[in-house]
Image: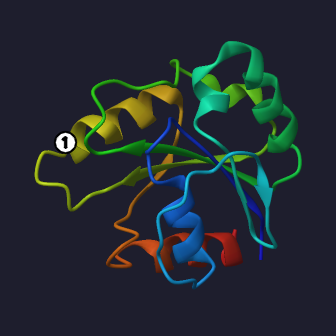
């Protein structure tokens, strides 16, 4: 199975998705540093939000086979610039999280990920498990 690094702003759902992908019980915990597990690398949102920490994301993208860009359906804007996927020589997938949020805009989050260059986009609700199996299948088969 391929290893994925998850990137996105704080509270986008990276740690919750990490727990779901690993089959763990879902509990809230703030990621303070990069957690490198067997099939997933969970990164703190601050690494995306603070320019001087962004280099760590670039370095960890080379520790994984797949880069997963996360955008929660309820985010007011995207942190990912247009065509950012060309910056790494790895598969880059888009993940829309929190798809069950009643204030969410999955269509808008999907468009932001497409603009960033993601060709494969997954929709997940880590709490219910919806969409998690599709990501695991992708990591197993691609």
Q: Residue furthest left?
A: 102
The local crowd at label 1, few if under 14, some if 14 to 19, many if 20 or more residues have their Cα within 10 Å, is some
* For residue 113, side relative to residue 89 (left or right): left
Q: Is residue 24 depicted above or below 50 in this figure?
A: below
Where residue 46 sits, quadrant-wise, is top right
- Which percent across, then down, holds residue 135? 54, 69
Q: How many marks?
A: 1
* For residue 71, side relative to residue 76 (left or right): right
Where residue 137 sits, quadrant-wise, is bottom right
Display coloring: rainbow
Q: Which residue is mark 1?
A: 105
Q: Residue furthest top?
A: 51
Instruction: Look at 48% across and 72% down and name the residue there.
Output: 27
Instruction: Look at 54% across and 54% down and name the residue there.
Output: 14
**In which quadrant will I find the C terminus?**
bottom right
**Secondary structure under the numbered disc 1 in the rendered image:** loop
- Which percent across, then down, holds residue 87? 74, 25
């Amino acid at each position: 199975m391929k290893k994925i690094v998850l990137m996105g702003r704080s509270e986008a759902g990276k740690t919750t998705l990490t727990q779901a992908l690993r089959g763990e019980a879902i509990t809230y915990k703030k990621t303070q540093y990069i957690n490198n597990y067997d099939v997933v690398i969970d990164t703190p949102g601050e690494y995306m939000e603070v320019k001087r920490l962004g280099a760590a994301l670039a370095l960890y993208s080379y520790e994984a086979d797949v880069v997963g860009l996360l955008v929660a359906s309820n985010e007011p804007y995207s942190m990912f610039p247009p065509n950012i996927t060309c910056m790494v020589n790895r598969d880059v997938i888009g993940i829309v999280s929190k798809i069950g949020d009643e204030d969410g805009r999955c269509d808008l989050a999907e468009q932001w990920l497409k603009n960033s260059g993601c060709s494969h986009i997954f929709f997940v609700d880590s709490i219910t498990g919806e969409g998690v199996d599709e990501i695991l299948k992708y990591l197993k088969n691609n």
